[in-house]
Image (tube, rainbow, N blue to C red):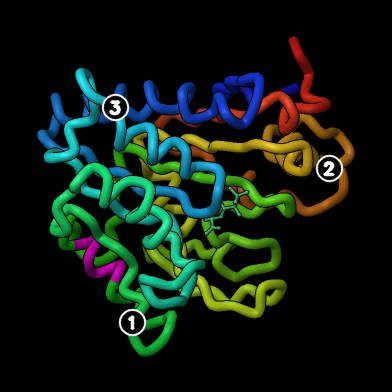
Amino acid sequence: MIRPELSLRVVESAGDIAAAAAPIVLAAEREAIAERGVFRIALAGGATPRPLYSLLASMRDPGPSFQRWQIFFGDERMVPAGHPDSNYRMVREALLDRAAIPPQRVHRVPTEAGSAAQAAALYAAELRSCFALAYGQLPRFDLVLLGLGTDGHTASLFPGSSAVTETSTQPVVATWVEKLAADRITLAVGAINAARTVVFLVAGADKAPALRAVLGADAQADAGAPAPPARAIAPADGELIFVVDRAAATGLPTG
Ligand code: 6PG
């Protein structure tokens, strides 16, 4: 039984995910601009979302109203902004440079800071400023895009990481990822769950076991193993959508 609170959209192949996700982004954008005059989106890193960013950059009539966007990042690797592993660099190449989005509308994680903790604190301060928050208040993104790792991580919320169980009202946490031997900065679970809409983009058969566990479609996973970090993503007052390809949906109940 898949968790009833979420929406699952299965597309044929990974190449179809961008076309299925773009209308969801544009609908969230339209509502945000109509209601608040601005669209605040947190982008996912990794490889899966890149075609979506390229598609959004190429759409015309109607295309996105980028002049109303404020762009944030769901997580970042603690590397320079021009590093091949940088999520910001991926987004710059796929979207920002192609859509000529003004730099003042882009809020990257300042990984040039002295440490991941300092980068996280600076990014949290940037969020508080952009969302006009008091200390301790969480940002309410209009849309958070997320990916899913084969181990059930999302953003940089990895199994065993203290960031997964972070219950403070810190919107951003720095986390050491043992398996990668790397520092990461990530939105905390609370900040993601405060969003109006959260969309997971998942492709590939290797993601199927993690996806089943996250969707609640894997009985033994529910019975024994600790829940994957991505299972903690459940917007308190928002929509949760999974856009997945058929390979990642392997073993899901078709009903
Ligand atoms: C990152 C992402 C991470 C990613 C998953 C899936 O910084 O890498 O935030 O959570 O979404 O690892 O990555 P792929 O889309 O490349 O499979």
Spatial CA distance of label 3 from label 2 is: 41 Å
Q: Which mark is residue 59?
A: 3
Vertical relation: 186 (above or below) 5:
below
Q: Position of residue 125 (x, y in %)?
A: 24, 69
Q: Mark 2 — residue?
A: 221
Residue 19 included in the magenta stretch of the image: no
Q: Is residue 187 visible?
A: no
Q: CA distance from mark 3 to mark 1?
A: 33 Å
Q: Is mark 3 in CB contact (under 8 Å) with mark 2?
A: no
Q: Write the residue at 13% across / 34% down.
A: 36
Looking at the rendered structure, the kind of residue marked 2 is Ala
What is the x, y in percent for residue 129?
Answer: 16, 62
Residue 112 has which mark? 1
**Label 2 Cα crowd, 10 Å radius (few <14 / some 14-19 / many 20+):** some
State the residue at coordinates (55%, 37%).
201
Please give left or right for residue 128 compared with residue 58 in the image: left
